[in-house]
Image: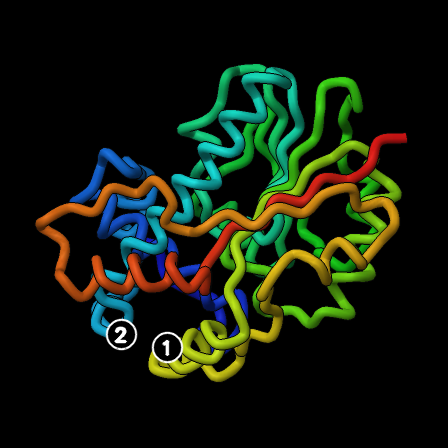
Amino acid sequence: MKNTLTLDMQSVQGTMLLPLWGRAEYSKKNPEILDDQKAIEIVENLDFDFSEIGRNFGEFGGLCYIIRARKIEDKIRDFIKIHPKATIVNIGSGLDTSFSRIDNEKIHWYNLDMPDAIEFRQSLIPDSERNSCIAKSFFDQSWFDDIVYNKEDGILFVSGGVLYYFKDEELQEIFAAMAKRFPGAEVYFDAETKRAIAFSNRMVKKTGNKGAMMYFYVNDGKKIKNWSPNIQEVECIRYFKDVKSKKSWLFQSRMQMFMLDKMRMMKFVHVKFKSE
């Protein structure tokens, strides 16, 4: 029997299904980039018609989702090589399945998301001893107290496709608080320029979701560096850096990747907080 979808599709939480679709559909075709068997299983067993999402986002959108997941996972892998007992906090985790591919049997992983999103997630992806959920808003700083970690073992915050939906002043406040509470921590997330955000909003509207508009953009890392004196370093990395395009991909997809990287319209942002 298939799982019935109860998520409000006219909301930010409704966007959980977009990367799920992308990872399931395009990891089948590109397992060398991402092999997300759990996403494939969830989509196959979810009572929801994904065809409209597929028509609206197409190949390029699907490739962006698997590349984003792979790049974030690679960053986590690099981090736990240095910090094998690290704590990873996935902000706005949605239906992310990275833990299953990254776990070294030593890390501790937290999935932070809104209560309705976590309820839906747990109906499909149960918690485990070292992979648990926190059902709170990112801006409810009480979640800080839910994170149990050893500073010496390192802590990395990651977020994929989430921070876009918030405003600068909201993010500045929470980042400043995090930098103070978690000295020496690192944050890794994806972002777009102001011009790219406008295009992304048009794409989301095509899906019929008018309740998930995007606001936050990063033209360069200077504004984030100025959010707090406890932010030590901000680096921006091109989104498609080191991604080898395949001849089987549409010419349009390959050209979009090339042009967006050349213009630095899509990127990953790596933030480091100062140590005490």
Question: What amino acid is at disc 2?
Answer: Asn
**For numbered disc 2, what is the local secondary structure?**
helix
Q: Is residue 112 left or right of residue 33?
A: right
Sequence-first disc among 1 and 2? 2
The residue positioned 60% from the left and 25% from the top of the image is 130
Q: Which residue is mark 2?
A: 56
Percent position (x, y) of residue 219? 58, 66
The residue positioned 62% from the left and 53% from the top of the image is 113
Q: Is residue 182 left or right of residue 250?
A: right
The label shown at residue 203 is: 1
Question: What amino acid is at disc 1?
Answer: Met
Neighbor class of circle 2 (other Cα within 10 Å; few <14, some 14-19, many 20+) is: some
Percent position (x, y) of residue 276? 90, 30
Q: Is residue 1 visible?
A: no
Say which quarter of the image contains residue 216.
Answer: bottom right
Between the residue at mark 1 and the residue at mark 2, the CA separation in whole angstroms equals: 7 Å
How many numbered callouts? 2
Q: Is residue 135 left or right of residue 245?
A: right
The residue positioned 45% from the left and 36% from the top of the image is 98
Percent position (x, y) of residue 144? 81, 43
Tell me whether circle 1 and circle 2 mark residues in contact (CB < 8 Å): yes
The residue positioned 27% from the left and 50% from the top of the image is 45
**For numbered disc 1, what is the local secondary structure?**
helix
Q: From this viewpoint, which residue is outermost toward the left?
A: 248
The one nearer the camera, 6 or 230, is: 230
Q: Is residue 187 visible?
A: yes
Q: From this viewpoint, which residue is outermost toward the front?
A: 262
Neighbor class of circle 1 (other Cα within 10 Å; few <14, some 14-19, many 20+) is: some
